[in-house]
Amino acid sequence: MAFFILIAGLVLLLFGGELLVKGAIALAVRFEIPTMVIGLTVVSFGTSAPELLVSLQAALNGHPDIAIGNVIGSNVANLALVLGLTSIILPIPVSRATVRIDQPVMILSVALLWFFMWDGNITAIEGAILFTLLILYITLLIRNAKKARVLEADMNEIKDLVKDNMPLWKSIGLILLGCVGLVFGSILLVDGATELARSFGISEYVIGVTIVAFGTSVPELATSLIAAFRKELDISVGNLVGSNIFNIMCILGITSMVKEIPVNPFVLSNDMYWVAGITAAVFLFSYHKMHIHRWKGIILILSYIAYIFVVLQ
């Protein structure tokens, strides 16, 4: 029963997130918000909404291990699993902006998170620092986007909605339905995950870092794989790097501002080394010839398999 509740939660999260993004973009377009700003804010935040709602729900219900595990596991999955699989199918070019700006910011977010965790808690003040840095990062992105091309995947989605000329009532309706789906999906997912952990005698952190994290990373995985099979080179490392930055600075930032998050000692003694190592590896792989080649993808996939094996021990 717990497994079906968890699956139902995942389905609601996926549909809720999709509806929220489409409705928010249509609403922003109607009020003539620049597409550049929509792509870098509305789309980015909307696609992170499932992870945010899951972490908030878990923290408020007294399951901090799921809240942190969701973010840690999603970050590892984005770089090691999603990027690894897509680069095996189609080697991915890396933009100079990603190497010079986005990846250093990602490394900084990981370092700050590790530092904030050392006392065993992520406090409201530390969460506010993370979220403030995210605002500064978005401001920098918007400034740089004026001189460069905005993410093609985001732009295509925006253009499609502009062509559809979605009515105001429909865009508001999609946002409301999306929010309802996200709220109930997060409740079901957290309840299903905790029940599953109890029934199998597995810790909530393991469930959070594996099943929950994988579930909330499914949209990125599906999108990247489909694009790779179609040989669409607009799938960039920057998309996944940006998602990881949002996971730490936005999701853990907001969650810890709402409720202080206690940190499982296993995160410090094990998981953060994996997060830091994979983050550094992706930076070095990106810098080398500005491509994520197939052999690099294989190494990333093997790293993900090794990480899951260690976590399950």
Image (cartoon, helix red, strand yellow):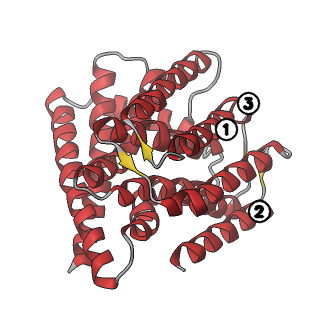
Residue at (36, 34) in percent of width and height: 124
Q: CA distance from mark 3 to mark 1?
A: 7 Å
Q: Which residue is mark 3?
A: 100
Give neighbour class at mark 2: few <14, some 14-19, many 20+ (Cα, 10 Å): some
- Which amino acid type corresponds to the residue marked 1 in the rendered image? Gln
- Helix, strand or loop status at disc 2: helix
Q: Could one spot residue 16 in this view of the protein?
A: yes
- Residue 67 occupies quadrant: bottom left
Q: Residues within 10 Å of mark 3 (few under 14, many from 20)?
A: few
Determine whether the residue tagged by mark 1 lies in a helix, strand or loop.
helix
Q: Position of residue 90 (x, y in %)?
A: 70, 58
Task: Name the foreground residue: 56 vs 238.
Answer: 56
Report which residue position mark 2 lands on: 294
Q: Which mark is residue 246?
A: none
Label 1 belongs to which residue? Answer: 103
Q: Quadrant of the C terminus?
A: bottom right
Disc 3 from disc 2: Cα separation: 23 Å
Asked if marks 3 and 1 touch (Cβ < 8 Å), the reply is yes
Q: Residues within 10 Å of mark 1 (few under 14, many from 20)?
A: many
Amino acid type, residue under disc 3 in the picture: Arg
